[in-house]
Amino acid sequence: MSKLLFSHSRFSVWIPLSLCLLFAVATSAARAETDSAQAEFFEKSIRPLLLKHCAECHGDKKQEMGLRFDNGSFIKGNEDYPEMVVTETPDDSRLMQVIIYSDSDIQMPPAGKMSDEEIGLIRHWIANGAYWPETEMQSGPKLGGPYDFAKLREEHWAYRPVDNPAPPEVAHAERVKTSVDNFVIKKLEDEGLMLSPAADKRTLIRRLKFDLLGLPPTYEEVQAFEQNESPEAYAELVEEYLAAPGYGQRWGRHWLDVARYADTKGYVFTAEPRYGFSYTYRDYVIEAFNSDKPYDQFLIEQLAADALELEEPKKELAAMGFLTLGRRFRNNKHDIIDDRIDVVTRGLMGMTVGCARCHDHKYDPIPTEDYYSLYGVFDSCHEPDEPDLPVIGEPLDQVAHEQYKTELARLADELHKFEQEEVRKLEHEVRHHVVAYLLKNITGGADVPAEYASAYEKHEPRGSLINRWNDYLKKQDPSHPIWEAWMTLSKLKPEELQQKSADEIKQLLQAGSSNPVITASLSNRNITSMYDVALAYGEVFRQTEASWREQQDKSTGLADASRESLRQELYGAGTPFDLNYDQWKGEFDRAVRNQQRNHISKQDKLRATSPGAPPRAMVLLDNAKPTEPVVFVRGVAGRRGDQVPRQFFKILEGEDRQPFSQGSGRLELAKKIASADNPLTARVFVNRVWMLHFGNGIVRTPSDFGARSDPPTHPELLDHLAAQFVANGWSVKNLHRLIVNSATYRQSGEPNAEARAIDPENRLLWRMPRRRLEFEAMRDAMLAAADKLDSKHGGTGVDLETSNRRTVYGFVNRNNFPTLFRVFDVASPDVSTPKRPQTTVPQQAL
């Protein structure tokens, strides 16, 4: 009895100890992921703000008030300002008080208040703990270079060329199923450990089907597999699942995390918030995985399909949604380009290039010049308007397509009539208010005195038309009948004008060379300044425009020759108002543009929501002339530094790198990334696939292979997988075969106290790690178990609350991302997410 009690007591003690250990490990991992996210937010959003607004007076050379904002020492405050940052109540922070200008004595920055968005970022940063790298809390950071590129290529594992080590010999050769096992078993044997026994068939089929298809096996499938005694039964199951359509839906969803996929743009003011054809990218990705498109080609198409020779209907163009489906950042071009640089470099190569936007990367060999080389690539491109996006297939519903065409034609006609009417009104309005442009000519574009500006109080002069009038008047011959009086009087000094204007006008009348309507108008007005001359001219042009509008027969000019010559100044070729239709539309004021935008939004919404809209590709196209980029000093676009060429990274390309020469350089960039010689691309991808099978990557920082990355637990295995991946034609399915057929993958997940004591985090893979089911697989599994899962493929996004389709086809709304998604750690569509965070909350066990 005492022995049983003792045994029970040990068991009772072991449970809480085990739970504590598991909690500690989980907490440590979660903290690492949280710190990584905070570090990224800090480097991309907070440090640039502080450098931009604060470092000049609170930096390494000058510390007003005893505070430095180029390192974290200010967070703790000083004797005079002890509560600079209060994380519990951010608005009590002294920092917040001075930047929101609530203190009338101290307002920072003194040159002008930060924008509401910038203040919001600072508040968010403080509320989330005011993260600052620990190494910089006392002294200013060493912001990057100079870098010893050659030394770093030799020393840092990720920059070395991919090796292809031979699988090592192992004592337990009978356990080896694929070459993966040689590397894993060798590490285990070195520590006196071994793989766990193989999992039972029921566990294996469930593991495999969830991993490859994201669905549970049916009862019949389990029974058939358990009863199949063939040694090839498991391998045949692998092939069956890799060939199933659900494979692309499962692994396509993983890729969409990296691509920060969404069906909406984020906040875009009054514009249509939906992407009309985002679904074509999602469907392209799913099809690419199902067809086992070579990964290098997959990457090239996502960056530069528009530069490839494609067969009609050029469906591969949809791949470019990888670049174009990011957030719109209130249409801030610099942030949009930064987002594209991030998804390309961090998503595809594990390089945190975004950290070099404001300064040289502090940890990795990425000078800020390299960031702006890529900035130049993407700044040399543009997105066509939605009506001009290339059609890449037939409509999904022909009946709906006919209805769509009819409605689209009606909306287009409605827009055209609106624009025609507004152009007509604008043409009359500006010709009615020539006086405004003549007055602006006198002031050089500056404000006109109020007593004269009242002459055009209902009209807002257009800047481009002011310039056209200025250029026009500069080119006039002094003897021009209409402008002779203007030229003559404008030559008089202001103090002479009142005394001499009458005589000058009298001489013009006597000479008879000037337009009599103009001279008569000037004669009847007391001229004290050129403003009065402008009023006289303006009144003549106003009357002329009114006469022309009243005349029914427009086939001939005005009957009065003097008036007709004035009309020609309003309508003739080469005159300031000689604009084509599109130019007139470009002169619409804000109110009219808003109405125009509403009309356009109706068409955009129809394209985005109608099942009859033909599928289009959301492409990016090269500009006619590429940008020659310059460095933005401290990331501020207005502070332009040295010019840099558009080229690849020095750490990867070496000293002999050459600038891109083909258009924007996107295709050249894509080929550099997708090259077998690139040491990062294959490593990053095989590591990500490994992570999705085992819960953690061989490198546990899948989006960062730089100096702050975790070193690989099995570096030889990582290189072996990468080399085999490339050698097998960049085949993703072959990579799966190599992994899931291994004994390492097929082993049991049962605990082992002795092994845990040696390797508590299971980094050596002595058992199969337990993994949490993602939200998509959980939802799809419940529908499949209830026999309610809709197996339809492709098409526009659906409402998951009312649809039984697979979760990958759900409409993803950045502006209203469901709380349920956040609770279950669905990847945020705002940023590339190679690895989803894992939050430990009780609800997730339900």
Image (cartoon, helix red, strand yellow):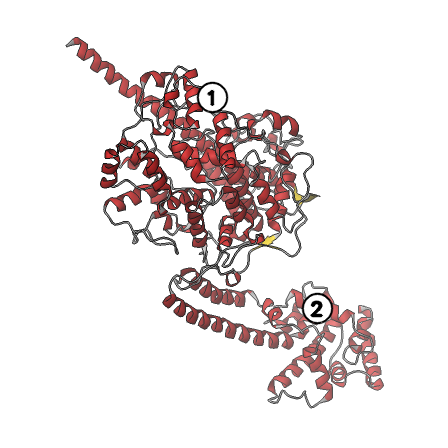
Q: Quadrant of the N terminus?
A: top left
Badge number at residue 31: none
User: Depth-wise, is mark 1 or mark 2 nearer the camera?
Assistant: 1
Q: Quadrant of residue 745?
A: top left
Residue at horizontal 49 percent and vertical 35 percent from the top: 725
Q: Residue furthest left?
A: 1
Q: Circle 2 is placed at which residue position?
A: 468
Q: Amino acid at mark 2?
A: Arg
Q: Amino acid at mark 1?
A: Pro
In the image: residue 749, left or right of residue 43: left
Image location (x, y in percent) of residue 542: 65, 80
Image location (x, y in percent) of residue 780: 30, 45
Q: Quadrant of residue 425?
A: bottom right
Crowding near the residue tagged with mark 2, few <14, some 14–19, many ≥20 C-alpha atoms within 10 Å: some
Give the mark, 1 or 2, whose residue is nearer the N terminus. Answer: 1
Image location (x, y in percent) of residue 134: 52, 26
Element marked by disc 1:
loop
Badge number at residue 168: 1
Query: Is 58 or 208 nearer to us in this picture?
Result: 208
Crowding near the residue tagged with mark 1, few <14, some 14–19, many ≥20 C-alpha atoms within 10 Å: some
With respect to residue 360, does 116 lie above or below? below
Image location (x, y in percent) of residue 34: 44, 33
